[in-house]
Image (cartoon, rainbow, N blue to C red):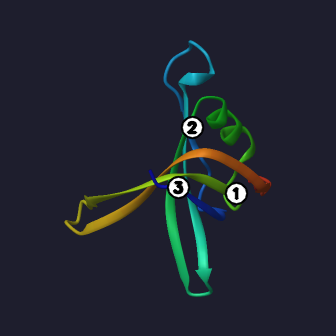
């Protein structure tokens, strides 16, 4: 088993959805965290959480919020509609700590 901890900022608002109405375990929330290693080096991690953790993220996180995510990571390859091969680092979080909540911008 692998485990990593990343600290970074959300690149966009979380995308949340409820898959059923039988309780909080049916909530799913996805977001991307940008973790900077150096001024010119940024790595992006896709995070997908479920249940009460997903509900908390949907309620409190916004684009620019800073989080610390600890969990297992997996890599996957995919092809873009333009035919380019890309890779994605996906995190299944065990713990998400909200460090700084960026307030939503008002239109």
Q: Which mark is residue 67?
A: 1
Q: Residues within 10 Å of mark 2 (few under 14, many from 20)?
A: some
Give the number of the mark in front: 1 or 3: 3
* In the image: residue 84, left or right of residue 92: left
Q: Residues within 10 Å of mark 3 (few under 14, many from 20)?
A: few
Measure the C-alpha gap from mark 3 to mark 2: 24 Å
**Which quadrant holds residue 35?**
bottom right
Task: Indicate the secondary structure of the residue bearing disc 2.
Answer: strand
Q: Which mark is residue 16?
A: 2
Please say if the residues under marks 3 and 2 sit with CB atoms less than 8 Å apart.
no
In the picture as drawn, the residue positioned furthest to the front comes out as 1
Task: Indicate the secondary structure of the residue bearing disc 3.
Answer: loop
Measure the C-alpha gap from mark 2 to mark 1: 17 Å
Q: Quadrant of the C terminus?
A: bottom right
Please say if the residues under marks 2 and 1 sit with CB atoms less than 8 Å apart.
no
Label 2 vs 1, first from the N-terminus:
2
Q: Residues within 10 Å of mark 1 (few under 14, many from 20)?
A: many
Say which residue appears at 59% left-offset and 57% top-offset.
12
Q: Which mark is residue 3?
A: 3
Residue 73, position as x, y percentages in the image: 46, 55
């Amino acid at each position: 088993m692998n485990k990593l901890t990343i600290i970074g900022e959300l690149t966009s608002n979380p995308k949340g959805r409820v898959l059923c109405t039988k309780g909080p375990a049916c909530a799913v929330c996805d977001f991307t965290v940008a973790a900077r290693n150096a001024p010119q080096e940024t790595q992006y991690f896709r995070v997908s959480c479920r249940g009460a953790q997903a509900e908390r993220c949907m309620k409190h996180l916004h684009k620019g919020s800073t989080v610390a995510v600890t969990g297992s990571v997996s890599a996957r390859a995919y092809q873009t509609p333009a035919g380019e091969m890309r890779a994605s680092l996906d995190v299944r979080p065990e713990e998400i700590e909200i460090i700084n909540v960026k307030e939503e911008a008002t239109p």
